[in-house]
Structures are given as structure tokens and as C-alpha cells.
Amino acid sequence: MPVIITSQETHPFLPSLGNPSAIDQRRALRQDIRPLEIAIINLMADKQATERQLAQWIGHTPLQVHLTFIATDSYMAHVREGRETKNTPAEHIHKFYNAWSDVKHRKFDGLIVTGVNALQERVEQEAIWPEVEAIFAWSKTNVFSSLFLCWGAKAALKYFHGIDSLKADVKTFGLFEHRLMSDKTGVAFGLPDRFSVPVSRWKSPRREDIVKVKALEIVADAPEAGPNILVESELYEQDTLLFPRRLYVLNHPEYDTDTLGREYVRDAVGNPAAPLPAHYYPENDPSEPAFNSWRHTGFLYTNWVKIIYAATPYNIENVPSVGV
């Protein structure tokens, strides 16, 4: 929970106002608290693994968070018709998931749109693109802050800013060092200046296209893998503080220790020459167990939750709309 600051004067040890771990005394006294409502549009085939990876970090705060798991209408129709679901038990979907059309009348403090098992050259060529477009349009009026992951980030960059993600000759795959750049909203608070994050993608937006968009702030960049964390911010608290209206995370701080290894084994089944994940195995030896050197980067998600808590209206029906 944030530290209450009782004076505008800078304390020599306590965090200053504007820091995500501080709150003004006047605001603290009038602050109403309710559970945050966060929707997760889970587009992944293995939905249970994604649920667990995200929930363990979103829940890693003293704040109460209510998660609503959502699948696209086409996917839910597929399940409800009794068709086979290869990677996630149909019973799990029936029990824990909502079709988007069943919840789109609601408003949410936060929205997460995950990656997808992409099949096409361009994001707009995927079969689910029309549904994802509708979700992005809805988020403008019904969501306070959105977090887009992996393919979801690339799709959102295309929808909101016209930025394409281009396929590389080789897959960017492994554990890559990132550099902390600018962080006006505090989403990367507590992360070191250099940190490693798992990367697993063929397509990436170009840095030169990103820097042309003045609304986008590059928070973390990797010399070998390109930009990772991008923020589109807005002012709140009488236009004195910034919150991430949209957060684009191209890589995977939420990955488990063995996720890259399992992806390598999967790829090697169809391609014995599949490259090892870079900088992942000790001495580049897949017989040696990898160790998790990126776990702390998952605090990106808890920082996001804390910032939403500080900025979102108490009455969720007052979640503002924007014209972007």
C-alpha cells in the first residue's frame, strides 16, 4: 500500500508525490476502496497456463482484484457446440469463461488482451481480427487502462497507431537483456536499469515506426530484440500525475522458468534443427536446467494494478472515454 505524504515539502527518506508508492494525505482521507475489476481476453490455446501466470502477479498486491476471464464469441460458440478443444478442457471453459458479447455492456478498471497462436503474416489477416478490432473499439469507452501482451500488443499497435509488425528471417527466441529507458508513469518501478526478459516471436514492430508516434513512450528496449514495453499515458489527479492508458508489452515477464524450454522442445519435434533459446541454458547446454533470472520483472503487472487503483474512479460507471 502507498505511504501517506502529509506535506508538500520533500522528506529526506520518504517517497515524494508522483511516486507510485506515495499518496497525498488529502486524497488518502477521501479515498474510497473497492475491488478492482480486471477483464482478461485470453486468446491463447493453453488458457490455463496463461491464467495462472497472469493471476499470480496481478494478485501479488494487498489490493482486492476481481478477474473476469473472457473468450471471443467465435471460440465460445465452438465450445458450446461441443466441438473438441485441443489445449484447454471444455469443462474449464464452460465453468470459468464468458463470451465477450455477454460482458461488453460492463465497464472495467483494467483490460488484458493476451497473445494468440498466430498463423498469418500480418495481424489483420488472422481470423479473429474483426472480433479483436471490436474489442479494441469497445475498450476506448469501457476500460480505464489496457495492457496488451505479445500478439495482443502488436495487434493494438496496428489498430491504435497503424504500426505494422514485420516478420524477421529468424525467430527472436531466448532470454534477452533490456535497458530501462524512460518511465513517466512508474510501470517499471523497482526494476533495475538492466534486466533480462523472455522473448519468443517472429514478428516485431520497427523502432523507427514507434518513435514517430509522439504518444508512445519506450520504457524498455533490448539491443538484440528491440523495444519491449511501450506506454501511452494520460493525466489524472487534477492533471498532475500520469497513468498508463494503454500499455504494450511485446515480451513475456510472466513466463515460468521452463516455458522457453518447453517451446524449444515443441519446435524441435517438427524441426530437429530448431535453434536453442538464446542466453537461456547454462553454457548453452539443453541438458542443464535453466534458472529463472527474470522473476522480478513480473512486478510490471503489480505496478500496473497499483497505478490503476490510484487513478481509476471509485464509481466504475465513471470510467472515462477517450477519442483515440
Image: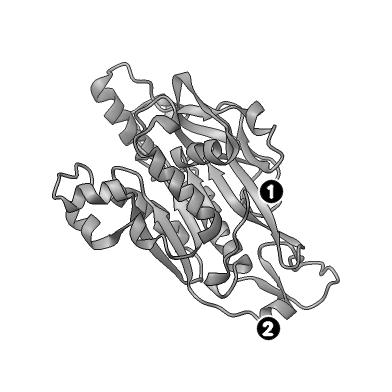
Q: Which residue is disc 2 drawn over?
A: 29
Considering the image in quadrants, where does the N terminus appear?
bottom right
Spatial CA distance of label 1 from label 2 is: 28 Å
Q: Measuring from the top left, give residue 68's x and y in whole percent.
A: 38, 62
Q: How is the image coloured?
A: one colour
Please give the label number shown on residue 213: none
Q: Nearer the viewer, residue 42 or 65?
A: 42
Residue nearest the observer in this picture, 227 or 14: 227
Residue drawn at the location 53% of the way across and 35% of the way down: 158
Label 1 residue SS: loop
Location of residue 196 (image quadrant): top right
- Classify 10 Å Cα crowding around label 1: few (below 14), some (14-19), many (20 and above): some
Write the residue at 46% across / 67% down: 37
Q: How many marks?
A: 2
Q: Nearer the viewer, residue 136 or 287?
A: 136
Q: Is residue 172 left or right of residue 323?
A: left
Going 60% across and 63% down the picture, which residue do you hit? Answer: 320
Where's residue 314, x and y in %? Answer: 57, 75
- Give the number of the disc on residue 183: 1
- When asked about the image quadrant of residue 126, the answer is top left
Helix or strand or loop: what does disc 2 sit on?
helix
Q: Identify the image quadrant of residue 29.
A: bottom right
Mark 1 or mark 2: which comes first in sequence? 2
In the displayed structure, 120 sits above or below 61; it is above
Q: Amino acid at mark 2?
A: Leu
Q: Position of residue 252 (x, y in %)?
A: 46, 42
Q: Residue at x 38, y 35 (%)?
A: 260
- The furthest residue to the bottom: 29
